[in-house]
Image (tube, rainbow, N blue to C red):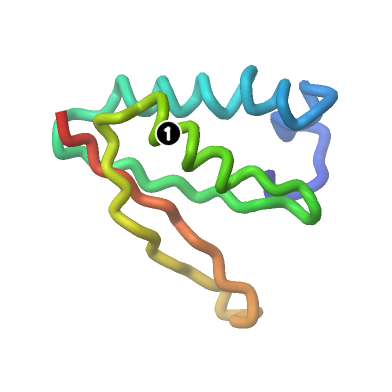
Amino acid sequence: MYEKKEKQSIHQYDNLQKWLQGFLYPTLKTCYRALEVNGTLALYISDFYNVKYTDTMKDWIINNLPNLKYMGNIYWWNENNSKVIRPIFTWRKIK
């Protein structure tokens, strides 16, 4: 979630755990099924204010999608605000 708008998925769930189970994890499974072997998943997602979930997401991927190998992050920033650097997490499907 990158903004506080009603159309964001987080507004469909009343707590973080329900959002993880009902949105993020199913989305990751769908992405995994769509990837070909040696395909790369580049995921732009970041913790939102005081809600921390990216470490939980990475742990979930390790435990539930073992054929994804974490490749590291690439980073981008808005040229109008170079103080905010955003990670893009990348995985490769190995089998």
Q: Is residue 61 left or right of residue 4?
A: left
Q: Which percent across, then down, holds residue 44?
A: 50, 50
Residue at 33% over, 41% down: 41
Q: Which percent across, then down, holds residue 66?
A: 30, 30
Q: Is residue 82 left or right of residue 91?
A: right
| Residue nearest the observer in this picture, 4 or 43 | 43
Q: Which image quadrant is residue 4 in?
A: top right
Q: Which image quadrant is residue 94 in?
A: top left
Q: Which percent across, then down, holds residue 37?
A: 15, 31
Q: Which percent across, then down, holds residue 84?
A: 63, 74
Residue at which label 1 appears: 61
Question: Across the whole image, how many numbered discs are drawn on residues?
Answer: 1
Residue at 45% over, 56% down: 88
**Taking 82 as reference, is 61 above or below it?**
above
Image quarter of the C terminus:
top left
Residue at 35% over, 27% down: 65
**Taking 41 as reference, is 31 above or below it?**
above
Q: Residues within 10 Å of mark 1 (few under 14, many from 20)?
A: many
| Residue nearest the observer in this picture, 70 or 88 | 70
Residue at 18% over, 29% down: 36
Q: Is residue 78 left or right of residue 10?
A: left
**Taking 84 as reference, is 63 above or below it?**
above
**Numbered disc 1: secondary structure:** helix
| Residue nearest the observer in this picture, 5 or 42 | 42
The three-letter code of the residue at mark 1 reads: Ile
| Residue nearest the observer in this picture, 63 or 13 | 63
Image quarter of the N terminus:
top right
Q: Which image quadrant is residue 13 in?
A: top right
